[in-house]
Amino acid sequence: MDDALPPAEPFRIKAVEGIRRLTRDQRLRALEAAHHNLFLLKSEDVYIDLLTDSGTGAMSDRQWAAMMAGDEAYAGSRSFDRLAESASEVMGFPYLIPAHQGRGAEHVLFSALVAPGQQVIGNVHFDTTRAHIEHRQAVALDLAVEEIYDAQDRSPFKGNLDVERAEAHIRGVGRDAVPLILVTVTCNSGGGQPVSMANLTAVRALADRWGIPFFLDACRFAENAYFIQQREPGYAGRTVASIAREMCNLADGCTFSAKKDGLANIGGFVAFRDASLYQKAIPWAILFEGFLTYGGLAGRDLEAIAVGLKEVVEQPYLEWRIGQVARLADGLRAAGVPLVEPAGGHAVFLDARRFLPHVPQTAYPAQSLACELYADGGVRGVEVGGVMAGRDPKTGQERFPRLEMVRLAVPRRVYTDAHMAVVVEAARLTLASSARIGGLRIVHEPPVLRHFSARFAPVPLSDLPRSPETRAARGS
Ligand SMILES: *Cc1c(COP(=O)(O)O)cnc(C)c1O
């Protein structure tokens, strides 16, 4: 802000969508009907929906207008040209294959580049990314810097890749075992934490030393660029657009979900700098997503993304967007709610281990906390913890991550700060009753991506195994 006025939305509202608030009893019934899995709730039973920032944003009048100009031709669509031009202007990648969403882009890229037994090195792979790598019978290896696993560490770039460990790993397994390095900006599964330009530059050098392709998972590339502008020495005077371009210039390509920083409700793409990698991906793209000029999307969707890519790097938008998330974090912190610090770009993460120290990881404290927050305020977040981490595909053992979090992801241009105040109040209520909150057990579990459809039953306080934290608190 260049003057003393308070921050406010850099838009006025042209269309509205009503939402309703159920009573607490109605919410408890809805929770039971959804088997304590918030993915199974009806959206109309949710008051403030912070399940995801994916595809949930509001489009601008310019995006809606562009949709009318969609060219729905099967091949050679003018809308594809407009998207490819926009992506090349904003990101600088000359070859683009549209996909129905980010995971479609992952499916195409990994089918082309990843063979069974190989290892894809990344900071913290997103869940669909990990699942797609494992679907190729390869290993998704997380090598983020240690800070990301410390919920209280306030380092500015906790999403960085640990380049030294990555290099040691490549040396150990051999170059041919690593088909690509994939750095996620911002690092969603690691708390929405940004990656610095210095780190991306070091990853580029690492990739060059070994001759390994370096891709970005660019879902939130604009938010990452904004953090670089705000936090990294030397970037304060630069435009976000120029920083975003510099980030992309370091990579050989990217996967992208347009449902995030495409400011669209659906879509994605995989982009390449190198013609030969692009050529390798083409047959898979046609097989899985559709012809190269539509990729599972309507022409109008391509138009919406083409406009969204330009709007998302605008300074007033990002200042407000990241600011709203930061103000939500400020409110929660002031209410005493334990958070993963610092706040991410698109989301605030509640630290479920500190929120519910008496619930052991085997009773899914973050899932339990997410359910309680819905019961208390009609606010829907999502578990990012043991449930989402799932099982090791080889051993079948549950993987318990170091952090148990509830992610409150803020849709773009949808809610006002008044809604955020309700979220803070709901969390305050949940915190006040936290000592009475128990855990959950799984009663139905699908084989992959279990968090989307698993069913749970409550485990009352009295039936919880005592966690190390509780034992410590009780002095035993
Ligand atoms: C959302 C997301 C994806 C997958 O994109 P979809 O459009 O949901 O398929 C991949 N990586 C990251 C970091 C994401 O946030």
Image (cartoon, rainbow, N blue to C red):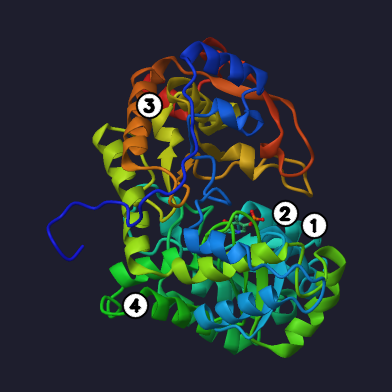
Q: Earlier in the sequence, mark 3 or mark 1?
A: 1
Rendered view: 239 above or below 37:
below
Q: Residues within 10 Å of mark 4 (few under 14, many from 20)?
A: some
Q: Residues within 10 Å of mark 3 (few under 14, many from 20)?
A: many
The residue pinned by badge 1 equals 135
Amino acid at the residue labelled 1? His
Q: Residues within 10 Å of mark 1 (few under 14, many from 20)?
A: some
Rendered image: mark on residue 239: 4
The residue pinned by badge 2 equals 131
Q: Nearer the viewer, mark 3 or mark 1?
A: 3
Say left or right for 135 vs 129.
Answer: right
Residue 369 percent across, percent down from the top left? 48, 28
Is the residue under label 1 in contact with that under label 2 (CB below 8 Å)? yes
Question: In this view of the protein, which residue sits in the foreground, 82 or 49?
Answer: 82
* SS of the residue under disc 2: helix
- Give the CA separation, mark 3 to mark 4: 37 Å
Question: In this view of the protein, which residue sits in the foreground, 101 or 3?
Answer: 3
Rendered view: 380 above or below 30:
below
